[in-house]
């Protein structure tokens, strides 16, 4: 049986979406270009992947289709172009993509949604997927090929100290591979989901040699992989042995904006490890790219750190303010992340910078509003002007109704589409003659979020402590009014449910503030959420995780600040004073 190629896929998709077009290979073009020639559509492109993108662009522009949601193509017959222009000429001019790397960050196992995710990415010209190594191990060869022919590179990485050096294998024979805390080597918990504050003894020369050996072995086992990462386990817990301690200034603590004031900075020790591993890896296997992360208490390049060829940093503005664009100099939070990015840009010596985005809010995927449309386009332009090579965002299909517009617009912004016409077109495609009503609703949502004050980090307390229940009741009314204009529309139904949820979540928060909330109240809200599993509103396992902790806090009579972690709660309370004016 012959293997499908990108070109045969493009031809098959042409037939599927009713696109009658001829293909021309033109390596002088920076991307696909659509032309009218002799009464036919012609898609010219420099390679097969761009031809495929051109097919989908024609399907959306002329064929009546909209590729807004994975697995749910929208077809509007009235948008089908009745006939081509009489004159030959360029219909969709070639445009050099604004960013080379455009993609998703997958924090969940591959499963039934994998194929529709890969399809959606190709339909929206996304070409990169960063996934945990533990999940990549279970991706079938068939799905790897499915991604490849759609032009999607998969990076096997994310937080992975524990993947390269699993405690179950190394703790007994090599306890010296693991961090020393308070004079004692840690015993790795084996909790592969969190591993918070469990790191390695990164200066250990035998450990470094073993990591390189494992990476080369991994490359042999997975020749289809071109990019891997060396990223600490999530959290802190860096080694304090005498050798590792030479890389710390115990008086130099982390920063408030990066949620790390309770620990000292780990940039020097992390970057010393990265430089060494990258040099050894590339000496043995130049074709493997190594990525690492700019995050929490290792945000900026340490002295002497450079981005060499074959290296890329994922710069993560984790706890950023969504009431400002990242480059807004007036934002006391985001201005620090912008400075971090500029610092990385200043040490590029052939390497690359990818921004690790959170266009789904941050932290727990709690479906809080993040209307980030115009800011996203502004940020993309600023990124490319300052040396950024790519943007990837965390996502889930199961909350697409809440954040799907961010994902849809991100794909277009990263390709360099026009801001205003693209946003306007999205609303017309999704809401037809009610586009302005829908847009007014989203402006109202944005207004509520902005009303909290100068800055806002999207966790519940930040939003609900500075807004009123009446705000959400008004939004719920507007959502129901939008639904009433077309009661059968599935998207509008879910938007109304989203606002009903916001009312319920805010009411529960207020009840807690009055010291009246109970575990039963928390469970009632959680049950309501789970009764809507047939929607794309909620990441249910994250709500379970979050509300299990909230119920514990209520049961023990402790304050619900966020997730019951003492140092994080302390930082949030300090942020309220310094950033929020509370």
Image (spheres, rainbow, N blue to C red):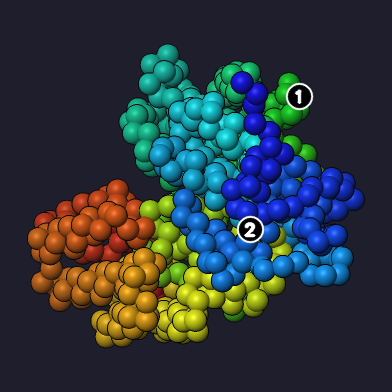
Residue 245, horizontal then vertical, whole percent = 53, 38
From the image, which quarter does the N terminus lie in? top right
In the rendered view, tell whether residue 200 sits above or below residue 490: above
C-alpha separation, residue under disc 2 versus residue under disc 1: 46 Å
Which of 474 and 565 lies nearest the eye of the viewer? 474
Q: Left or right of 306: which side holds 413?
A: left
The residue indicated by pointer 1 is 283
In the rendered view, tell whether residue 183 sits above or below residue 76: above
Q: Left or right of 386: which side holds 79?
A: left
From the image, which quarter does the C terminus lie in? bottom left
Residue 55, horizontal then vertical, whole percent = 68, 52
In the rendered view, tell whether residue 549 sits above or below residue 381: above
Disc 2 on helix, strand or loop?
helix
Q: Are marks 2 and 1 in contact (CB under 8 Å)?
A: no
Q: Which of the 4 quarters of the picture holds residue 9?
A: top right
Residue at 59% from the left image edge and 38% from the top image edge = 147
Q: Which of the 4 quarters of the picture holds residue 571?
A: bottom left
Regarding residue 137, the answer to whether it shows in the image is yes
Q: Nearer the viewer, mark 2 or mark 1?
A: 2
Residue at 87% from the left image edge and 48% from the top image edge = 26
The residue indicated by pointer 2 is 59
């Amino acid at each position: 049986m012959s293997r499908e190629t990108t070109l045969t896929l493009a031809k098959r998709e042409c037939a599927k979406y009713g696109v009658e077009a001829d293909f021309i290979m033109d390596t002088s073009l920076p991307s696909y270009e659509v032309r009218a020639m002799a009464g036919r559509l012609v898609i010219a492109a420099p390679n097969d992947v761009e031809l495929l993108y051109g097919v989908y662009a024609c399907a959306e522009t002329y064929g009546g289709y909209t590729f807004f949601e994975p697995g749910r193509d929208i077809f509007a017959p009235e948008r089908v172009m009745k006939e081509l222009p009489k004159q030959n000429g360029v219909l969709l001019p070639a445009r050099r993509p604004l960013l080379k790397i455009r993609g998703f960050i997958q924090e969940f196992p591959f499963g039934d949604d994998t194929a529709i995710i890969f399809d959606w990415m190709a339909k929206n010209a996304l070409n990169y997927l960063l996934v945990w190594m533990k999940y990549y191990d279970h991706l079938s060869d068939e799905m790897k090929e499915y991604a490849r022919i759609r032009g999607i590179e998969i990076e096997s990485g994310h937080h992975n100290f524990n993947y390269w050096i699993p405690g179950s294998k190394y703790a007994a024979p090599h306890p010296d591979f693991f961090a020393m805390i308070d004079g004692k080597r840690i015993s790795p918990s084996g909790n592969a989901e969190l591993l918070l504050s469990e790191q390695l003894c990164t200066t250990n020369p035998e450990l470094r040699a073993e990591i390189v050996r494992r990476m080369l072995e991994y490359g042999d086992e997975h020749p289809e992989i071109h990019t891997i990462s060396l990223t600490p386990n999530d959290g802190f817990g860096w080694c304090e042995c005498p050798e590792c301690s030479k890389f710390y200034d115990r008086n130099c603590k982390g920063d408030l904006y990066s949620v790390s004031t309770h620990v000292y900075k780990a940039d020097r020790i992390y970057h010393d490890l990265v430089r060494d591993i990258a040099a050894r890896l590339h000496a043995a296997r130049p074709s493997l790219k190594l990525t690492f992360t700019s995050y929490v208490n290792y945000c900026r390049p340490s002295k002497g750190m450079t981005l060499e060829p074959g290296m890329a940093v994922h710069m993560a503005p984790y706890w950023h303010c969504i009431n400002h664009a990242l480059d807004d100099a007036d934002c006391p939070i985001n201005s620090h992340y912008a400075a971090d990015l500029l610092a990385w840009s200043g040490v590029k010596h052939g390497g690359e910078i990818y921004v690790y985005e959170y266009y789904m809010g941050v932290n727990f995927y709690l479906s809080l509003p993040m209307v980030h449309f115009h800011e996203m386009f502004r940020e993309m332009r600023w990124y490319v002007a300052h040396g950024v090579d790519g943007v990837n965002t965390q996502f889930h299909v199961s909350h697409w109704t809440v954040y799907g517009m961010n994902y849809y617009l991100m794909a277009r912004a990263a390709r360099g589409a026009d801001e205003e016409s693209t946003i306007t077109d999205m609303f017309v495609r999704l809401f037809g003659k009610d586009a302005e009503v829908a847009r007014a609703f989203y402006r109202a949502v944005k207004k509520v979020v902005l009303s909290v004050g100068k800055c806002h980090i999207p966790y519940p307390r930040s939003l609900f402590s500075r807004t009123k229940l009446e705000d959400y009741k008004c939004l719920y009314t507007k959502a129901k009014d939008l639904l009433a204009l077309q009661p059968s529309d599935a998207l509008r139904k879910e938007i109304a449910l989203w606002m009903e949820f916001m009312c319920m979540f805010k009411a529960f928060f207020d009840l807690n503030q009055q010291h009246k909330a109970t575990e039963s109240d928390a469970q009632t809200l959680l049950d309501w959420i789970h009764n809507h599993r047939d929607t794309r509103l909620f990441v249910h396992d994250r709500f379970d995780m979050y509300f299990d902790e909230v119920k514990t806090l209520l049961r023990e009579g402790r304050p619900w600040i966020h997730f019951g972690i003492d140092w994080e709660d302390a930082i949030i309370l300090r942020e309220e004073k310094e950033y929020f004016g509370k």
